[in-house]
Amino acid sequence: MKTTAASKSSSRARPAAPPTIPAAGAKTAFPETLLRQAEGVRKAGLACVKRMPSYLQLLRVLQAEGREHVSGTVLAGVHHLEPVIVRKDLAITGAVGTPRIGFRIPELITAIEQFLGWDHQTKAVLVGVGNLGTALLGYQGFHDYGFRIVGAFDSDPNKVGKWVHGRKVQTIAQLIPFVRRGEILLGMLTVPGPAAQETAEVMVRAGIKGIWNFTATKLQLPKKVVTQKEDLAEGLAVLSHRLQKRPQDASS
Amino acid sequence: MKTTAASKSSSRARPAAPPTIPAAGAKTAFPETLLRQAEGVRKAGLACVKRMPSYLQLLRVLQAEGREHVSGTVLAGVHHLEPVIVRKDLAITGAVGTPRIGFRIPELITAIEQFLGWDHQTKAVLVGVGNLGTALLGYQGFHDYGFRIVGAFDSDPNKVGKWVHGRKVQTIAQLIPFVRRGEILLGMLTVPGPAAQETAEVMVRAGIKGIWNFTATKLQLPKKVVTQKEDLAEGLAVLSHRLQKRPQDASS
DNA sequence: TAGATTGTTAATCGATTAACAATC
DNA sequence: TAGATTGTTAATCGATTAACAATC
C-alpha cells in the first residue's frame, strides 16, 4: 500500500474542530470533508489497534468520574506510553482535540468504538464447553466491548442440554441453523486441539466470518474468513524469556 | 544497544555442526567456541520469542512420529511463515542445521527449551480463583511448557478450603509463607480488576519475580519485577477491526 | 555433480521517537 | 501573553523480506 506521496499532499493544514466547517485556509486542493477520517490516508498498524481497548477502558472510568476532557498526555501517563504515540493513535480514529484542553471524552469514546466496530452489539457463538470455554462463557468483561456470546455448543452428549452461565449447551448439528437464523458473524473456538480444524470448517459453513481461535492449532481456512489466534504460550514464552535474562523493563 | 559493528566482524564464517570442532577455516580472529550461542551477538526480538512455542509444539509432534530431522522450510510451511524467518529464529537459539537435511529434532527441541527457560519445571502460584482462575487451574496445556501451578489462593472465605482441579484454595495470608518455602518465582494474577494492584504487591512482597497479569489493570511495581499482561480485549480489537474493513489475510 | 537448504548481509517495511510549528 | 497541548514531518529503531554465498 504505497500512500506516501498522497499522504504528504496536505502538508501542514490543520482541520478545524469536528462539528464546524474545516478551515478554509487549507493549503492544497485536497478534497476536504467534514470528517477527518474521510481523508482515509493514515493507516492503523496492528500495535495501534491493540492499544485502543486500553484507552477505551480508561476513558470510561474518567467519564464515570464526571470528567469531560482528557489530554493525550494523561492517557499516555497512565499507560506508560509516549504522548506522541497516543496522539497518533487517536488521530487514526478521527478524533480531534483542542490544544491546552485535550479531547472531549464522549466524542473520543465514540470515535474509538466506531474505529473498532464496537459501537454496536456483536453476537458470537462459542464452540467447545471445556474449562476454557466455560470460563469465557462466565467472563463479564466482554460486555464492555459490545460483545455477547449468544450460544454455546459441544459435541459431548454429556454436556449437551446442560446450562452453563446462562446458556444451554447445544449440539454441533444445531450450530448451522442457529448461526444462520441469528446472522452471527463471530465464533470462539475452544475445542481440544485435534478437533479444531474440523470444527472451524463447520463454523465457516454456517456462515461465521471471523474465528477467535483459542486452540494451539493453525487453522487452514478460506482467505475470506478472518481468524485471530489467542495463544497463552506466547505470553508465557515472553515472560519466561525476560525472567531468564534480566528483569529490567516492566510493561505490565 | 549498538551491536551493529561488532556483529559484522565475523562476516561469512560458518561454524561446523555442533558436536564437532568449528571449522578451522574461519576468516576472522573472532574467538570461536563450541556453542554458537557463546558469540552472544544476535538479539532476540519480541516477535521471535513469541514464535518459539509454536516451533516447539510442532517439533514434539514430529518427534512423536519418529522423525529425526526437520528443515526450516517445513517448519515455515506449517506455520505460514517465510523460511528465512524460521532460519533466523532458530539461529538465535544457537541451533545449527545441516544444508539439505535440516536440523536434528532432539537438539532443536533442547535449544528452544533452553532459550525459553523451559528446560526445567517452573512452579507458579495462582491468585484469584474465579471463572478464569478456575479455567487456568484446569488447563492441561501448561504441562508441555514445564509450567506447573502448585498453589491457588483467594480472599473469598467461601472459596478457601475448596478443592479446584486438584489444588486446595488457600487464603492470601498463606501466600507469603507458601511462596517463600517453595521458592516460587512466578505468579498468575486472576483477581477482579480493583484488587489487582494490591494483590500484586503482596505477591512481590512474598518474593515473586514475575507476574502473569490477566487483569485489565496496569500494575505499578518495582522495575525488577517482570510483568506480562494477557489481555483478551487486544485480540478482540484486532479481530473486530479486521472484520470491519476487509477480510483478506488469514493468520490464525 | 546438482540442487535443496543453511546462514548471512543488505534492503525494505512498519512502528516508535524526536523535533517542532500551530493553536488555544 | 505564556505555556501546555495538538498534529505533523523527519529520523531512528526493530522486524521482515530479498538476495546470495557456502555447504552437504
Image (tube, coloured by chain):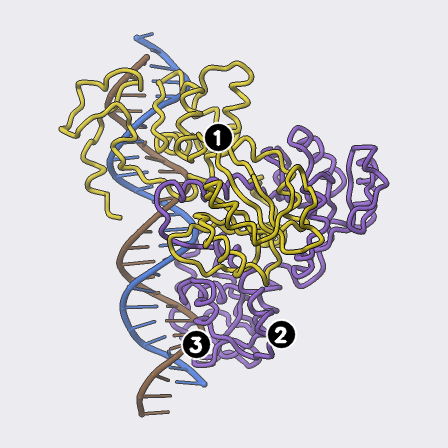
Chain colours: A purple, B yellow, C blue, D brown
Pick whichever of labels 2 and 3 is earlier in the sequence.
Answer: 3
In this rendering, the answer to whether A115 lies above or below A172 is: below
Question: On residue A178, which mark appears?
Answer: none
Identify the residue at image location x=47%, y=29%.
Answer: B76
The single residue placed furthest to the right in the displayed view is A161
Task: Provide the residue designation for mark 1.
Answer: B55
Is there one chain holding both mark 3 and mark 1?
Answer: no
**Amino acid tagged 3:** Ala
In this rendering, the answer to whether D1 lies above or below B193 is: below
Is there one chain holding both mark 2 and mark 3?
Answer: yes
Task: Provide the residue designation for mark 2.
Answer: A64
Task: Provide the residue designation for mark 3.
Answer: A26
In this rendering, the answer to whether A130 lies above or below A121 is: above
Identify the residue at image location x=55%, y=16%.
Answer: B65
Q: Chain under label 2?
A: A
Mark 3–mark 1 distance (CA, rounded to whole Å): 53 Å
Q: Chain under label 3?
A: A
Pick the front one: A17 or A211 = A211
* Callout 2–callout 1 Cβ contact below 8 Å: no
- The image shows residue C21 at horizontal and vertical percentages of 32, 76
- The image shows residue A62 at horizontal and vertical percentages of 57, 73
- The image shows residue A218 at horizontal and vertical percentages of 58, 34
Label 3: element kind: loop
* Callout 3–callout 1 Cβ contact below 8 Å: no
